[in-house]
Every structure is written in C-alpha cells, then in structure tokens.
Amino acid sequence: MADQTTLTPAALAVKLVRQSIAPTGKLSAYSVRGRGELREQQLLATYVLVHGSWHGGWCWYRVAARLKRAGHRVITPDLLSLGCDTTPYRDVTLQGWTDQIARHVQSASEPVILAGHSRGGIVISEVAEKVPEQIRMLVYVSAFLLRSGQSLLEVAGGDSQSLVLPGLAFSEDRLSASIRPDVATAAFYGDCGEEDIALALSLLRPEPLAPSSTPVQISSDRFGHVPRMYIECSRDRAISPSVQTMMQAALPCQRRTVIDSDHSPFISRPDELARTLLLLAQ
C-alpha cells in the first residue's frame, strides 16, 4: 500500500474524503446513551452504493455518513479503473464490474439495498440478474434503467437535452473518454457550491467505454423478481427528466420519488437522498 507521500494528488484527495466517513463495523454499530456509555445496536441494513461515470465511491461520502450514523452498514466501492483503482481501461468490461459488485453484495449477511447512480444503473441491473436472492431492493438514482438488449450509449444518444455527449473527449485508442470540466460543471453539479465542484472535478477519472456499449442482459425470472425504486432528479442536465420518465414507462418500478436537484443529489441534496434511502430500511 502506498503511503500519503507517494499518492497522486487525486488519489490523496479520495483517501482523505474516505477518511472523513466513520468506519463501517462488520457486525454492529454504536451510539452514545445516558451518561456516555456505549450501547451496541443491531445493524439494520446493508447498502451498496455504485457510482456513475467518471466518479468513484468518494461521491457518496455525505450520504454514506448519514446512513452510517443511523446504524447501517455502507459499502461504496470504486469500480475497476475509477476512483483509486488502477485497472487498465482495456481490461474493463460490464461483466467485470458486475462480478466486482456482486462480490460485495454476497459479502453481506442479509439481502442488501443496492443503489446505482447514472451509469451505475446498468451495473446494478446486471448484478440483480446474477444474484437476485441477495438483493432486497434496487434503487436507481437518476440512473439508466434499461430493457434487456439495450446499451447505455444507445439510450444516451437519443437524449437530445443532455449536455454530456457533446462534451466528451475520447482517448486516441477510443477505449476511454473524459468530460470537459465546463460541461461536467453544468451537467452534473448545477446546484453544488464552488468548493464542492472544485473537489469533484479534481477527482474525476476517464471513463472506460466498453461497458456503456455493451447491451444489458436481464430476465423477468431473475432481475424481474427484485423490487425496484427510481429516484428522479427534476433539474438533471445529464439524463433529462423526459428520458428518466421514458425509461420508467418501459420498465416500471414499484416505487418512485422525485428530488428537486441536479444530477448529483449525493452532493447537493444529501439529507433528502439519505432520508429516501433510509425509508427503505424500515
């Protein structure tokens, strides 16, 4: 493991953000009671939170802290090649991401609440197909909710109101794409403060393209048996509200709620997003 003196500035920032979240207990959480004595509490639920394109597990830090304070276990992994992970882009596939998250899901002692943001939606759908019995509920946070056989690029390419695709810069080998800072600011962080935006922009990594061009493969017998919730972001400029509505019409969810926010409610509306997720554990 590299120490702080050998980490890149971005990796160090990710580490410091992660350290700002209270550690996750394996079996129990603690709260202060009476004159300061500790009372052990049963962990109520396990949340696995999957980040979207260009981001890492760091983006959930405010929501994760709130869930943990309520006594829950929270897992916020970096997908392969993103966040602090150094897997080469050429080795990244949708199947690889699916297997990675499925291992986290299977590590829990009870079915998890599995949430995905934006591109993370295609990952959680595939995980639900792989291990449906291990998932209590799927939560799509302004995420791609695709029918079997659809790819993310296919659906995103039809979103004429999205700011994202025109702002991409592709690598020479066409294996990854970055997003221009000005486009990321407008598309992702419209309701965020200047300091939050500066931090987020410093942590974005190039996005491997193979997963987004891979058609999702799900079935009614497996994926279809897992309850689903969709959290819409009403002022989203990355996945337009009309496309969020269209995806839900094609693949309805048992629950739906709307947050009046930009594409990143984990930064701009963490209290509201955390409250919505906490209700699922009741």
Image (cartoon, rainbow, N blue to C red):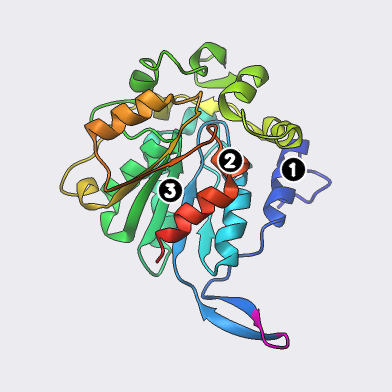
**What amino acid is labelled 3 in the image?**
Ala
User: Element under label 2?
Assistant: loop
- For label 2, the crowd category at 10 Å Cα-Cα, with few meaning under 14, some 14 to 19 and many 20 or more, is many
| Secondary structure category for the residue under label 3 | strand
Q: Taking 174 as reference, is 223 left or right?
A: left
The percent position of residue 178, horizontal first and vertical second, equals 59, 21
Q: Callout 1: 10 Å neighbours few (<14), some, many (20+)?
A: some
Question: Which residue position is annotated with label 1?
Answer: 13
Q: Which residues are magenta?
A: 32-36
- According to the picture, the residue beneath numbered tag 3 turns out to be 115
Query: Please, what is the dominant secondary structure of the magenta stretch?
Result: loop
The residue under label 2 is 56
Residue 192: give x, y in percent of width and height. Answer: 66, 34
Of tags 2 and 3, the one toward the viewer is 3
Disc 1 from disc 2: Cα separation? 12 Å
In this view, the residue farthest toward the right is 5
In this rendering, the answer to whether 278 lies above or below 144 is below
Q: Is residue 34 magenta?
A: yes
Q: Foreground residue, 19 or 247?
A: 247
